[in-house]
Image: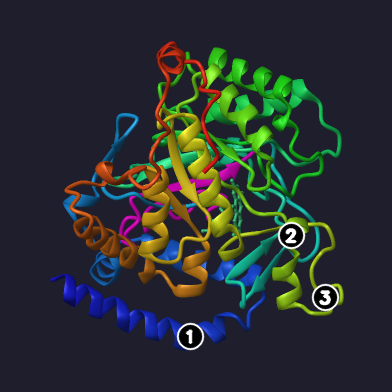
Amino acid sequence: MSFIIGLRNFVFKVLYRIFRPIIFLMDPEQAHYTLKKGGVFLGSNPITRAITSLLFDYNHRMLNIEVDGIKYRNPVGLSAGFDKDGELTKIYPSLGFGLAELGSFTGEVCPGNPGKRLFRMVKSKSIVVWYGLNNLGAEKISSRLANADFGRLKVGINAAKSNVTPEFVLEESIRDYIKTLTLFKDIGDYFTINISCPNTQDGEPFVDKANLDALLIAVNQKIRTISNKPIYIKLAADLSLAEIDVIIDGCIEHKMDGVVLTNLAKPDMNQEHIAAEYPSNLGVLPKGKGAMSGLPLQRISTNVIRHVYRRTRGSMTIIGVGGIFTAKDAYEKITSGASLLHMITTMIFDGPQNINEINRGLVQLLKEDGFTSLEQAVGSRNPLPILSQESVDLTESNDVNDSAEVA
Ligand SMILES: Cc1cc2nc3c(=O)[nH]c(=O)nc-3n(C[C@H](O)[C@H](O)[C@H](O)COP(=O)(O)O)c2cc1C
Protein backbone atom coordinates (compact mmCIF):
# COMPACT_ATOMS: atom_id res chain seq x y z
CA MET A 1 0.00 0.00 0.00
CA SER A 2 2.79 2.40 0.96
CA PHE A 3 4.41 1.66 -2.43
CA ILE A 4 1.20 2.62 -4.27
CA ILE A 5 0.91 5.85 -2.29
CA GLY A 6 4.57 6.57 -3.02
CA LEU A 7 3.90 6.07 -6.73
CA ARG A 8 0.80 8.29 -6.53
CA ASN A 9 2.87 11.03 -4.86
CA PHE A 10 5.64 10.69 -7.40
CA VAL A 11 3.17 11.19 -10.28
CA PHE A 12 1.79 14.35 -8.60
CA LYS A 13 5.30 15.58 -7.88
CA VAL A 14 6.19 15.31 -11.58
CA LEU A 15 2.89 16.95 -12.60
CA TYR A 16 3.46 19.79 -10.14
CA ARG A 17 6.99 20.27 -11.54
CA ILE A 18 5.48 20.62 -15.02
CA PHE A 19 2.80 23.11 -13.93
CA ARG A 20 4.91 25.09 -11.43
CA PRO A 21 6.50 27.37 -14.07
CA ILE A 22 2.99 28.41 -15.12
CA ILE A 23 2.00 29.16 -11.52
CA PHE A 24 5.29 31.04 -11.08
CA LEU A 25 4.47 33.25 -14.06
CA MET A 26 1.73 34.75 -11.92
CA ASP A 27 2.35 37.48 -9.40
CA PRO A 28 2.91 35.59 -6.09
CA GLU A 29 0.01 37.25 -4.26
CA GLN A 30 -2.30 36.60 -7.22
CA ALA A 31 -1.14 32.95 -7.26
CA HIS A 32 -1.86 32.69 -3.52
CA TYR A 33 -5.34 34.12 -4.06
CA THR A 34 -6.05 31.78 -7.03
CA LEU A 35 -4.86 28.64 -5.19
CA LYS A 36 -7.01 29.61 -2.21
CA LYS A 37 -10.04 29.95 -4.47
CA GLY A 38 -9.29 26.46 -5.85
CA GLY A 39 -9.10 25.11 -2.30
CA VAL A 40 -12.43 26.71 -1.36
CA PHE A 41 -14.03 25.06 -4.40
CA LEU A 42 -12.54 21.62 -3.61
CA GLY A 43 -13.76 21.89 -0.03
CA SER A 44 -17.25 22.99 -1.00
CA ASN A 45 -18.87 19.60 -1.62
CA PRO A 46 -18.49 15.96 -0.57
CA ILE A 47 -17.59 14.71 -4.04
CA THR A 48 -14.61 17.01 -4.59
CA ARG A 49 -13.52 16.36 -0.99
CA ALA A 50 -13.67 12.58 -1.53
CA ILE A 51 -11.68 12.81 -4.79
CA THR A 52 -9.08 15.04 -3.11
CA SER A 53 -8.79 12.54 -0.24
CA LEU A 54 -8.28 9.70 -2.68
CA LEU A 55 -5.49 11.60 -4.41
CA PHE A 56 -3.77 13.27 -1.44
CA ASP A 57 -4.68 11.77 1.94
CA TYR A 58 -2.65 9.34 4.04
CA ASN A 59 -3.32 7.72 7.41
CA HIS A 60 -1.11 5.71 9.72
CA ARG A 61 -1.66 4.94 13.39
CA MET A 62 2.03 5.59 14.20
CA LEU A 63 1.42 9.25 13.35
CA ASN A 64 -1.33 9.71 15.96
CA ILE A 65 -0.20 11.97 18.75
CA GLU A 66 -1.87 13.53 21.79
CA VAL A 67 -0.57 16.97 22.73
CA ASP A 68 -1.95 18.95 25.67
CA GLY A 69 -5.03 16.73 25.72
CA ILE A 70 -5.77 17.12 22.00
CA LYS A 71 -5.60 14.06 19.75
CA TYR A 72 -4.03 14.77 16.36
CA ARG A 73 -4.21 12.17 13.60
CA ASN A 74 -0.78 13.28 12.39
CA PRO A 75 1.68 16.05 13.35
CA VAL A 76 1.80 17.82 9.99
CA GLY A 77 0.07 21.19 10.07
CA LEU A 78 -0.55 24.16 7.86
CA SER A 79 1.24 27.21 9.25
CA ALA A 80 -0.38 30.58 9.95
CA GLY A 81 -0.43 33.01 7.06
CA PHE A 82 -1.73 30.82 4.25
CA ASP A 83 -5.37 30.98 5.33
CA LYS A 84 -5.56 34.49 6.75
CA ASP A 85 -9.37 34.62 6.75
CA GLY A 86 -10.06 31.01 7.73
CA GLU A 87 -11.74 29.98 4.47
CA LEU A 88 -10.29 26.56 3.64
CA THR A 89 -10.85 24.34 6.66
CA LYS A 90 -13.03 21.88 4.77
CA ILE A 91 -10.28 20.80 2.38
CA TYR A 92 -7.26 20.51 4.72
CA PRO A 93 -8.08 17.02 6.06
CA SER A 94 -8.42 15.70 2.49
CA LEU A 95 -4.98 17.14 1.68
CA GLY A 96 -3.52 15.09 4.54
CA PHE A 97 -3.07 17.79 7.20
CA GLY A 98 -3.56 16.78 10.83
CA LEU A 99 -3.90 20.41 11.91
CA ALA A 100 -4.15 23.89 10.46
CA GLU A 101 -3.40 27.20 12.11
CA LEU A 102 -5.72 29.92 10.84
CA GLY A 103 -4.88 33.61 10.77
CA SER A 104 -3.17 35.64 11.96
CA PHE A 105 -6.45 37.27 13.00
CA THR A 106 -6.41 40.74 14.48
CA GLY A 107 -8.92 42.63 16.62
CA GLU A 108 -9.50 45.24 13.90
CA VAL A 109 -9.88 44.80 10.14
CA CYS A 110 -6.35 45.00 8.71
CA PRO A 111 -5.65 45.89 5.07
CA GLY A 112 -1.98 44.96 5.50
CA ASN A 113 0.98 46.78 3.99
CA PRO A 114 0.71 48.69 0.69
CA GLY A 115 2.44 47.71 -2.57
CA LYS A 116 3.89 44.39 -3.70
CA ARG A 117 3.93 42.08 -0.70
CA LEU A 118 5.22 38.66 -1.74
CA PHE A 119 8.46 37.77 -3.52
CA ARG A 120 9.64 34.31 -4.63
CA MET A 121 13.26 33.32 -4.18
CA VAL A 122 13.47 30.16 -6.25
CA LYS A 123 17.18 29.40 -5.65
CA SER A 124 16.73 29.64 -1.90
CA LYS A 125 13.31 27.92 -1.86
CA SER A 126 11.97 30.87 0.06
CA ILE A 127 9.23 33.48 0.04
CA VAL A 128 9.91 37.02 1.18
CA VAL A 129 6.74 38.13 2.93
CA TRP A 130 5.68 41.75 3.42
CA TYR A 131 1.96 41.17 3.99
CA GLY A 132 1.59 43.03 7.29
CA LEU A 133 -1.25 40.92 8.76
CA ASN A 134 -3.96 41.56 6.15
CA ASN A 135 -7.20 39.92 7.32
CA LEU A 136 -10.89 40.68 7.64
CA GLY A 137 -10.72 41.12 11.40
CA ALA A 138 -11.71 38.85 14.28
CA GLU A 139 -15.38 39.86 14.43
CA LYS A 140 -16.27 38.96 10.88
CA ILE A 141 -14.18 35.78 10.74
CA SER A 142 -15.28 34.45 14.14
CA SER A 143 -18.95 34.93 13.29
CA ARG A 144 -18.46 33.03 10.00
CA LEU A 145 -16.65 30.15 11.76
CA ALA A 146 -18.92 30.13 14.84
CA ASN A 147 -20.67 26.83 14.15
CA ALA A 148 -18.12 25.26 11.83
CA ASP A 149 -17.50 21.54 12.21
CA PHE A 150 -13.80 20.91 11.56
CA GLY A 151 -14.21 17.12 11.63
CA ARG A 152 -10.90 15.30 12.06
CA LEU A 153 -8.87 18.49 11.51
CA LYS A 154 -7.49 20.15 14.63
CA VAL A 155 -7.51 23.92 14.37
CA GLY A 156 -5.26 26.55 15.85
CA ILE A 157 -6.37 30.17 16.10
CA ASN A 158 -3.44 32.54 15.61
CA ALA A 159 -4.02 35.99 17.15
CA ALA A 160 -1.82 38.96 16.30
CA LYS A 161 -2.20 42.61 17.19
CA SER A 162 -3.75 44.88 14.56
CA ASN A 163 -1.20 46.55 12.32
CA VAL A 164 -3.04 49.81 11.82
CA THR A 165 -1.02 52.47 13.65
CA PRO A 166 2.71 53.19 13.85
CA GLU A 167 2.69 53.85 17.61
CA PHE A 168 2.78 51.11 20.20
CA VAL A 169 0.36 51.59 23.08
CA LEU A 170 0.59 48.68 25.51
CA GLU A 171 -2.99 48.73 26.83
CA GLU A 172 -4.48 49.02 23.34
CA SER A 173 -2.32 46.21 21.99
CA ILE A 174 -3.31 43.90 24.83
CA ARG A 175 -6.97 44.81 24.34
CA ASP A 176 -6.61 43.90 20.67
CA TYR A 177 -5.22 40.41 21.41
CA ILE A 178 -7.85 39.81 24.11
CA LYS A 179 -10.64 40.84 21.73
CA THR A 180 -9.58 38.22 19.17
CA LEU A 181 -9.00 35.47 21.72
CA THR A 182 -12.38 36.16 23.36
CA LEU A 183 -14.25 36.12 20.05
CA PHE A 184 -12.66 32.76 19.20
CA LYS A 185 -13.04 31.22 22.64
CA ASP A 186 -15.31 28.44 21.37
CA ILE A 187 -13.72 27.98 17.94
CA GLY A 188 -10.83 25.60 17.24
CA ASP A 189 -8.62 23.55 19.52
CA TYR A 190 -5.69 25.74 20.58
CA PHE A 191 -4.58 29.37 20.54
CA THR A 192 -1.30 30.80 19.26
CA ILE A 193 -0.38 34.32 20.30
CA ASN A 194 1.80 35.75 17.58
CA ILE A 195 4.23 38.24 19.15
CA SER A 196 6.66 37.97 16.26
CA CYS A 197 5.19 39.39 13.06
CA PRO A 198 8.24 40.98 11.35
CA ASN A 199 6.09 43.24 9.15
CA THR A 200 4.22 45.52 11.55
CA GLN A 201 4.57 49.28 11.89
CA ASP A 202 5.43 49.19 15.58
CA GLY A 203 7.94 46.31 15.57
CA GLU A 204 7.93 43.45 18.06
CA PRO A 205 7.31 45.14 21.42
CA PHE A 206 6.47 41.94 23.32
CA VAL A 207 10.09 40.85 23.26
CA ASP A 208 10.37 43.31 26.14
CA LYS A 209 9.89 41.47 29.45
CA ALA A 210 7.58 44.04 31.06
CA ASN A 211 5.30 44.15 28.00
CA LEU A 212 5.26 40.36 27.74
CA ASP A 213 4.40 40.01 31.43
CA ALA A 214 1.51 42.48 31.05
CA LEU A 215 0.17 40.57 28.02
CA LEU A 216 0.40 37.13 29.60
CA ILE A 217 -1.14 38.31 32.88
CA ALA A 218 -4.11 39.71 30.90
CA VAL A 219 -4.37 36.46 28.91
CA ASN A 220 -4.47 34.43 32.12
CA GLN A 221 -7.03 36.70 33.75
CA LYS A 222 -9.33 37.14 30.78
CA ILE A 223 -8.90 34.06 28.58
CA ARG A 224 -8.02 31.18 30.93
CA THR A 225 -11.27 31.92 32.77
CA ILE A 226 -13.43 31.51 29.65
CA SER A 227 -11.54 28.88 27.64
CA ASN A 228 -9.48 25.82 28.51
CA LYS A 229 -7.68 25.64 25.17
CA PRO A 230 -3.88 25.31 25.27
CA ILE A 231 -2.13 28.62 24.59
CA TYR A 232 1.12 28.79 22.63
CA ILE A 233 3.38 31.78 21.95
CA LYS A 234 4.98 32.23 18.51
CA LEU A 235 8.55 33.53 18.61
CA ALA A 236 10.64 35.35 16.02
CA ALA A 237 13.55 33.61 14.31
CA ASP A 238 16.23 36.23 14.80
CA LEU A 239 16.25 36.70 18.55
CA SER A 240 19.44 36.48 20.56
CA LEU A 241 19.69 33.60 23.00
CA ALA A 242 19.22 36.07 25.85
CA GLU A 243 15.99 37.35 24.27
CA ILE A 244 14.72 33.82 23.66
CA ASP A 245 15.41 32.93 27.28
CA VAL A 246 13.51 35.98 28.57
CA ILE A 247 10.45 35.00 26.54
CA ILE A 248 10.68 31.31 27.40
CA ASP A 249 11.10 32.06 31.10
CA GLY A 250 8.11 34.42 30.86
CA CYS A 251 6.05 31.66 29.20
CA ILE A 252 6.95 29.25 32.00
CA GLU A 253 6.31 31.85 34.71
CA HIS A 254 2.85 32.60 33.28
CA LYS A 255 2.12 28.93 32.62
CA MET A 256 1.73 29.07 28.87
CA ASP A 257 1.37 25.60 27.36
CA GLY A 258 3.97 25.90 24.66
CA VAL A 259 5.70 27.78 21.88
CA VAL A 260 5.68 27.90 18.08
CA LEU A 261 9.27 28.06 16.77
CA THR A 262 9.69 30.11 14.64
CA ASN A 263 8.28 32.93 12.56
CA LEU A 264 10.04 34.28 9.44
CA ALA A 265 13.75 35.24 9.23
CA LYS A 266 14.66 38.87 8.61
CA PRO A 267 16.74 39.42 5.47
CA ASP A 268 19.09 41.81 7.32
CA MET A 269 20.74 38.83 8.97
CA ASN A 270 20.50 36.55 5.94
CA GLN A 271 21.67 38.78 3.10
CA GLU A 272 23.46 36.00 1.23
CA HIS A 273 20.13 34.57 0.04
CA ILE A 274 19.00 37.90 -1.37
CA ALA A 275 22.37 38.43 -3.05
CA ALA A 276 22.20 34.96 -4.65
CA GLU A 277 18.70 35.58 -5.97
CA TYR A 278 18.82 39.21 -6.99
CA PRO A 279 22.53 40.07 -7.52
CA SER A 280 21.80 43.73 -8.16
CA ASN A 281 18.46 43.86 -6.29
CA LEU A 282 17.38 46.87 -8.36
CA GLY A 283 14.54 47.72 -6.03
CA VAL A 284 13.00 44.26 -6.52
CA LEU A 285 12.72 43.64 -2.80
CA PRO A 286 11.49 46.28 -0.37
CA LYS A 287 14.65 47.49 1.36
CA GLY A 288 14.79 46.61 5.04
CA LYS A 289 11.25 45.21 4.85
CA GLY A 290 9.78 41.72 4.67
CA ALA A 291 11.09 38.44 6.04
CA MET A 292 11.97 35.03 4.63
CA SER A 293 10.32 31.63 4.88
CA GLY A 294 11.62 28.29 3.67
CA LEU A 295 15.18 27.07 3.35
CA PRO A 296 16.97 30.15 4.82
CA LEU A 297 14.92 29.56 7.97
CA GLN A 298 15.40 25.82 8.26
CA ARG A 299 18.59 25.71 10.32
CA ILE A 300 17.75 28.80 12.34
CA SER A 301 14.40 27.44 13.54
CA THR A 302 15.80 23.97 14.29
CA ASN A 303 18.55 25.53 16.42
CA VAL A 304 15.94 27.54 18.34
CA ILE A 305 13.88 24.36 18.88
CA ARG A 306 16.98 22.54 20.18
CA HIS A 307 17.80 25.35 22.57
CA VAL A 308 14.25 25.77 23.90
CA TYR A 309 13.74 22.02 24.36
CA ARG A 310 16.87 21.87 26.48
CA ARG A 311 16.14 25.02 28.45
CA THR A 312 12.61 23.84 29.31
CA ARG A 313 13.79 20.23 29.70
CA GLY A 314 10.98 19.18 27.38
CA SER A 315 8.31 20.51 29.72
CA MET A 316 6.64 22.78 27.15
CA THR A 317 4.98 21.83 23.90
CA ILE A 318 7.00 22.90 20.88
CA ILE A 319 5.47 23.32 17.44
CA GLY A 320 8.34 23.30 14.95
CA VAL A 321 8.15 25.42 11.81
CA GLY A 322 10.56 26.73 9.21
CA GLY A 323 11.89 25.22 6.02
CA ILE A 324 10.34 21.74 6.24
CA PHE A 325 10.47 20.25 2.73
CA THR A 326 11.05 16.55 3.38
CA ALA A 327 10.25 13.89 5.96
CA LYS A 328 13.89 14.13 7.03
CA ASP A 329 13.51 17.87 7.74
CA ALA A 330 10.31 17.15 9.68
CA TYR A 331 11.94 14.33 11.63
CA GLU A 332 14.90 16.53 12.53
CA LYS A 333 12.52 19.03 14.14
CA ILE A 334 10.66 16.24 15.97
CA THR A 335 13.81 14.58 17.27
CA SER A 336 15.05 18.03 18.33
CA GLY A 337 11.97 18.47 20.53
CA ALA A 338 8.91 19.43 18.45
CA SER A 339 5.68 17.46 18.96
CA LEU A 340 3.81 19.11 16.09
CA LEU A 341 4.86 20.81 12.84
CA HIS A 342 3.71 23.67 10.68
CA MET A 343 4.60 24.40 7.06
CA ILE A 344 3.69 26.59 4.07
CA THR A 345 6.60 27.05 1.68
CA THR A 346 6.89 23.39 0.70
CA MET A 347 3.36 23.50 -0.72
CA ILE A 348 4.41 26.37 -2.97
CA PHE A 349 7.69 24.86 -4.19
CA ASP A 350 6.94 21.12 -4.07
CA GLY A 351 3.15 20.86 -4.38
CA PRO A 352 0.32 19.71 -2.10
CA GLN A 353 1.16 15.99 -2.38
CA ASN A 354 4.23 16.70 -0.29
CA ILE A 355 2.09 16.93 2.86
CA ASN A 356 1.25 13.24 2.78
CA GLU A 357 4.69 12.36 1.41
CA ILE A 358 6.17 13.92 4.57
CA ASN A 359 3.73 11.92 6.72
CA ARG A 360 4.57 8.73 4.82
CA GLY A 361 8.29 9.37 5.19
CA LEU A 362 7.88 10.01 8.92
CA VAL A 363 6.42 6.54 9.42
CA GLN A 364 9.45 5.08 7.63
CA LEU A 365 11.91 7.09 9.75
CA LEU A 366 10.14 6.13 12.98
CA LYS A 367 10.38 2.46 12.03
CA GLU A 368 14.06 2.75 11.09
CA ASP A 369 14.78 4.14 14.56
CA GLY A 370 12.78 1.38 16.23
CA PHE A 371 10.02 3.64 17.56
CA THR A 372 6.43 2.46 17.74
CA SER A 373 4.92 5.90 18.20
CA LEU A 374 5.67 9.51 17.32
CA GLU A 375 5.78 10.50 20.99
CA GLN A 376 8.86 8.33 21.52
CA ALA A 377 10.78 10.27 18.86
CA VAL A 378 10.13 13.75 20.31
CA GLY A 379 13.47 15.14 21.48
CA SER A 380 15.21 11.78 21.01
CA ARG A 381 18.27 13.30 19.29
CA ASN A 382 18.54 16.23 21.67
CA PRO A 383 19.58 14.63 24.95
CA LEU A 384 19.10 16.79 27.99
CA PRO A 385 22.11 17.73 30.12
CA ILE A 386 22.30 15.80 33.38
CA LEU A 387 21.09 17.92 36.27
CA SER A 388 22.71 18.42 39.63
CA GLN A 389 20.38 17.72 42.60
CA GLU A 390 20.06 21.47 43.10
CA SER A 391 18.71 22.04 39.60
CA VAL A 392 16.38 19.04 39.87
CA ASP A 393 14.76 20.79 42.85
CA LEU A 394 14.48 23.98 40.81
CA THR A 395 12.85 22.17 37.90
CA GLU A 396 10.43 20.37 40.20
CA SER A 397 9.35 23.67 41.70
CA ASN A 398 8.61 24.77 38.10
CA ASP A 399 11.46 27.26 37.93
CA VAL A 400 13.66 27.60 34.91
CA ASN A 401 16.90 25.69 34.77
CA ASP A 402 19.69 28.24 34.39
CA SER A 403 22.23 25.59 33.52
CA ALA A 404 20.63 24.47 30.25
CA GLU A 405 23.21 24.45 27.50
CA VAL A 406 22.82 25.82 24.06
CA ALA A 407 22.75 23.02 21.55
C1 LIG B 1 2.81 34.08 2.75
C2 LIG B 1 3.10 33.93 4.21
C3 LIG B 1 2.32 34.62 5.14
C4 LIG B 1 2.58 34.45 6.51
N1 LIG B 1 1.77 35.10 7.43
C5 LIG B 1 1.89 34.79 8.74
C6 LIG B 1 0.94 35.26 9.69
O1 LIG B 1 -0.02 35.98 9.36
N2 LIG B 1 1.11 34.92 11.00
C7 LIG B 1 2.14 34.12 11.42
O2 LIG B 1 2.22 33.81 12.62
N3 LIG B 1 3.06 33.65 10.54
C8 LIG B 1 2.94 33.96 9.23
N4 LIG B 1 3.84 33.44 8.32
C9 LIG B 1 4.97 32.62 8.79
C10 LIG B 1 4.63 31.12 8.72
O3 LIG B 1 3.56 30.81 9.58
C11 LIG B 1 5.85 30.25 9.08
O4 LIG B 1 6.26 30.57 10.39
C12 LIG B 1 7.00 30.48 8.11
O5 LIG B 1 6.54 30.64 6.78
C13 LIG B 1 7.98 29.33 8.12
O6 LIG B 1 7.44 28.15 7.61
P1 LIG B 1 7.75 27.62 6.11
O7 LIG B 1 9.23 27.73 5.92
O8 LIG B 1 7.25 26.22 6.08
O9 LIG B 1 6.99 28.50 5.20
C14 LIG B 1 3.63 33.62 6.95
C15 LIG B 1 4.43 32.95 5.99
C16 LIG B 1 4.15 33.09 4.64
C17 LIG B 1 5.02 32.34 3.64
Residue at numbered disc 1: 19
Residue 381 in picture, x, y percent from top left? 36, 48
User: Image point 18% across, 53% down: which residue?
Assistant: 370
Looking at marks 3 and 2 on the same chain, the residue that comes earlier in the sequence is marked by 2
Q: Are marks 1 and 3 in contact (CB under 8 Å)?
A: no
Amino acid type, residue under disc 3 in the picture? Asn
Image quadrant where one finds the N terminus = bottom left
Residue 117 in picture, x, y percent from top left? 73, 63
Residue 209 in picture, x, y percent from top left? 70, 23
Figure check: 347 above or below 67: below
Looking at marks 1 and 2 on the same chain, the residue that comes earlier in the sequence is marked by 1
Looking at marks 1 and 3 on the same chain, the residue that comes earlier in the sequence is marked by 1
Residue at numbered disc 3: 281
Residue 45, located in which quarter of the rendered image?
bottom left
Measured Cα–Cα span from mark 1 to mark 3: 27 Å
User: Image point 51% across, 44% down: which residue?
Assistant: 407
Residue extending farthest left: 1
Figure check: 391 above or below 364: above
Q: Secondary structure at mark 3?
A: loop
Amino acid type, residue under disc 1 in the picture? Phe
Q: Residues within 10 Å of mark 1 (few under 14, many from 20)?
A: few
- On residue 342, which mark appears? none
- The residue segment tinted magenta is 80-107
Which secondary structure dominates the residues rendered in magenta? loop
Of 29 and 341, which appears nearest the observer?
Answer: 341
Q: Which tag is nearer the camera, tag 1 or tag 2?
A: 2
Q: Secondary structure at mark 2?
A: helix
Residue at numbered disc 2: 267
In the image, is 233 to the left or to the right of 128? left
Q: Secondary structure at mark 1?
A: helix
